[in-house]
Amino acid sequence: MITMINELISALMNGDKATATAVGIDFLQMIVMFIIGGILIYLAIKKDYEPALLLPIGFGAIICNIPLTSIVAHPQTGEPGVFGFLYETTIANELFPVLIFIAVGAMIDFTPLFQTPLMLFFGAAAQFGIFATMLVALMLGFSLPEAGAIGVIGAADGPTTIYVANAFKLKELIGPLSVAAYSYMSLVPIIQPPVIKLLTTREERKIRMNFKQRNVSKLTKILFPIVVTVISGLVAPESVALIGALMFGNLIRECGVLNRLSETASNTLSNLVTLLLGITIGTTMEADAFLNWKTLLIMGMGLVAFIFDTAGGVLFAKFINLFRKEKINPMVGAAGISAFPMSARVIQKMAKDEDPMNFVLMQSVAANVSGQLGSVVAGSMILVLVGKLIGL
């Protein structure tokens, strides 16, 4: 910063307006990025918005914008610094997103889905926002790969967003895409209720749903991740890396003979990868790449994607109710996004607010874990469709 100030003073004293303007803009951009990084850290600490990710992302955004730093790349030689190397070896080759999915799989219990298999359809319906937002992004002038990556934000699935953006070689957008995805994930309790209330009546929100407890065999729990991986791989081979990692983590959890590995995956691995993923993504948020009109549009489109996904699940539930005698609480459809288990808790709280004796948590959790699967499949479909169109 001192060097930048000296350059500015020297340019002004020598009457070099072009240099003074350039240095002044660089200085202003640096300050803006410091403020953005500070806001992310504030939201993480004060508001508890996805602190495990927003805090390291915010700190990474600060350190990568310090003048003449070589943590990303050496300013003279261009040789990668420690975080540049970390990006190339852990995100560019999709290692971190895959490891995150192993950890997520080790945390997920699919038992509620086995007991209410109908909820699987809501995990699919809630992905409507991905494709709707993709079309809107195209109309706003984004390229096809950029629009696809922006649409995936609506799945409330950060690792899939990063995976898709990296597959399309959108390094300059990974920072804003990640910030949008994880920021809106943390804002699910704020974003979803108004959308749900707008699309439902109080009587619909008070609908009670019967839940029948069924015994789920251990064999079923073991076969499920294997069968899902095989079927998904045959339908969309591009999904194998993510869906395979997710199901492998779940298989470790359910097999019953790898308890230490399951605990390691769901705790140590998750924490370590999340920490390094966050700060590495933060160091991609250099001012030149982050401070542009695309970043503002991405943040806006991310919100649109979340709203569309929530609306898609609710409207699908209302449509199904036209043909069912035993009605489904439409709010459950909104839990089809993959913000697990936050969205399920939001739906249960809303149901309890309308009727203190209404309990829809199990159905919401089932839709929520279905959304985790649906987001991966939807992201893979975008990789396939867009990849073929652009010749990847």
Image: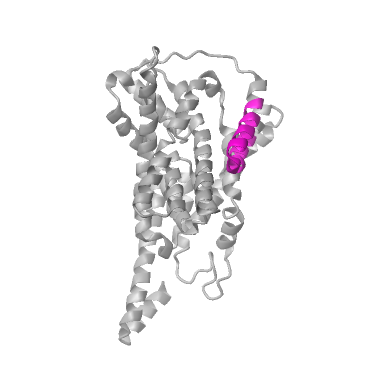
Q: Position of residue 40 (x, y in %)?
A: 40, 51
User: Position of 176 compared to 74: left or right?
Assistant: left
For residue 165, say whether it is visible: yes
Residue that appears at 41% across and 71% down: 1
Instruction: Kindly indicate the quadrant of the structure image that contains residue 133.
Output: top left
Instruction: Specify whether residue 248 is painted magenta.
Output: yes
Can you say whether 106 is above or below 214 in the image? below
Above or below for 238 versus 288? above
Instruction: Where is residue 57? Give x, y as percent.
Output: 47, 53
Q: Residue 290, how many percent across, how many down?
A: 41, 60
Numbered label tally: 0
Q: Please identify the quarter of the rendering in which residue 197 is found.
A: top left
- The answer to whether 90 is drawn above or below residue 346 in the figure is below
Depth order, front residue of 258/55: 258
* Residue 267 within the magenta-colored segment of the rendering: no
Say which residue appears at 44% left-offset and 60% top-offset: 62
Say if residue 267 shows up in the picture: no
Residue 273 placement, left or right of 39: right
How far across and how far down the image is residue 245, in percent?
62, 39
Of all residues shown, which one is farthest toward the bottom?
A: 14
Name the main secondary structure of what is drawn in magenta.
helix
Camera-nearest residue between 310 and 270: 310
Find residue 249 and report its image quarter.
Answer: top right
Residue sticking out furthest to the right? 257
Q: How is the image coloured?
A: one colour
- The residue at 37%/28% (across/down) is 314
Magenta highlight range = 223-250
